């Protein structure tokens, strides 16, 4: 018997085989769509920044917190992409909600480094009072002068579609908009595009925040920073041409 053969039940092995077929279909969809390729390019660049950042040697406990949060985004992007390519769009989006929460936290910390120590030393009660997801969003909106509640809307969207069992969450289990929900993975271009486009938008924000923490004079990080900057320019030129800088 070949090593590893019959380790898992036959139905689970069959499911994995189907996932691999869906991955090939997904790669075919991406190959024919420049916009999806741009999203994945910026995701890779942001993940590379996170990987470089964690290699920076420091005794600063606050900076180590930012490094660990960056590492968490690396893992989250990797897992989310694997799920998306395997046809689990809702589950992929659920992981992206985690990335969104980390982005908000890093944004808060990059604007006020003193908050990192308060966060890492806080007990559960203090952490929930000062650093719960809703509190972080409120502080950021107040700091930036935002009144549109866009951050809250994005978090709520991820929660309703992927994070919580709601009627709206069934939308992401439908290969066709007006069709029935299905069990198991499926591959459909619109669903794949929706998840990967959100992944790309979050990757831009992750990369920006990691850049804010990387020491400007650390030469080892320069190639990754330059690569991210170029991919960001390319991404903005297509998706937000007015914001290109």
Image (cartoon, helix red, strand yellow):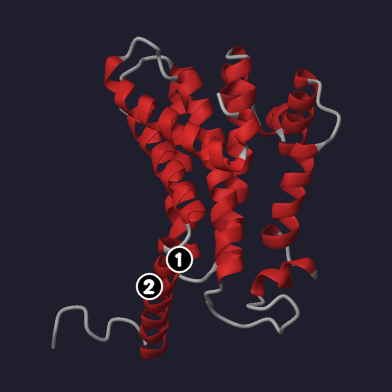
Q: Nearer the viewer, residue 243 or 45?
A: 243
User: Against 188, is 68 above or below?
Assistant: above
Q: Which residue is drawn at 47% across and 54% down?
A: 34
Q: Which residue is drawn at 42% across and 31% down?
A: 230
Residue 66's spot in the image, x, y percent? Answer: 48, 26
Q: Could you tell which of marks 2 and 1 lies nearer the N-terminus?
A: 2
Q: Which of 203 and 38 is in front in this view?
A: 38
Task: Judge left or right: residue 142 versus residue 31.
Answer: right
Q: Which label sits in the foreground, 2 or 1?
A: 2
The quadrant the N terminus occupies is: bottom left
Quarter where residue 145 is shown: top right
Q: Nearer the viewer, residue 36 or 172?
A: 36
Residue situated furthest top in the rendering:
217
Residue 20's spot in the image, x, y percent? Answer: 37, 75
User: Against 44, is 220 above or below?
Assistant: above
Quarter where residue 143 is shown: top right
Mark 2: secondary structure: helix
The answer to whether residue 200 is seen in the rendering is yes
User: Against 146, is 12 above or below?
Assistant: below
Mark 2: give few (<14), some (14-19) or many (20+) Cα within 10 Å: some
> Which residue is tagged 1?
85
Mark 1: give few (<14), some (14-19) or many (20+) Cα within 10 Å: many
Task: Judge left or right: residue 209 versus residue 175.
Answer: left
The answer to whether residue 166 is seen in the rendering is no
Disc assigned to residue 24? 2
User: Against 224, is 41 above or below?
Assistant: below
The quadrant the C terminus occupies is: top right
Residue 89's spot in the image, x, y percent? Answer: 57, 66
Asked whether disc 2 touches disc 1, contact meaning CB atoms under 8 Å apart, the reply is: no
Q: Distance between the residues labelled 2 and 1?
A: 8 Å
């Amino acid at each position: 018997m070949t090593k590893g053969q019959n380790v898992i039940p036959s139905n689970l092995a069959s499911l994995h085989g189907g996932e691999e077929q869906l991955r090939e279909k997904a790669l075919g969809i991406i190959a024919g769509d420049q916009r999806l390729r741009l999203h994945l390019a910026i995701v890779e660049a942001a993940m590379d920044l996170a990987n470089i950042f964690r290699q920076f040697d420091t005794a600063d406990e606050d900076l180590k917190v930012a490094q660990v949060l960056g590492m968490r985004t690396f893992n989250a992007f990797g897992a989310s992409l694997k799920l998306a390519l395997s046809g689990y769009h809702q589950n992929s989006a659920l992981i992206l909600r985690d990335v969104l929460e980390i982005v908000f936290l890093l944004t808060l910390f990059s604007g006020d480094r003193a908050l990192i120590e308060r966060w890492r030393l806080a007990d559960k009660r203090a952490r929930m009072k000062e650093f719960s997801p809703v509190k972080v969003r409120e502080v950021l909106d107040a700091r930036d002068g935002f009144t549109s509640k866009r951050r809250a809307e994005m978090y709520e969207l991820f929660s309703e579609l992927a994070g919580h069992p709601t009627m709206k969450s069934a939308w992401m289990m439908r290969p066709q908009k007006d069709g029935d929900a299905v069990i198991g993975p499926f591959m459909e271009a619109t669903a794949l595009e929706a998840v990967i486009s959100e992944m790309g938008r979050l990757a831009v924000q992750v990369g920006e925040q990691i850049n804010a923490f990387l020491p400007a004079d650390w030469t080892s990080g320069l190639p990754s920073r330059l690569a991210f900057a170029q991919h960001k320019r390319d991404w903005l030129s297509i998706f937000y041409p007015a914001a290109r800088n």
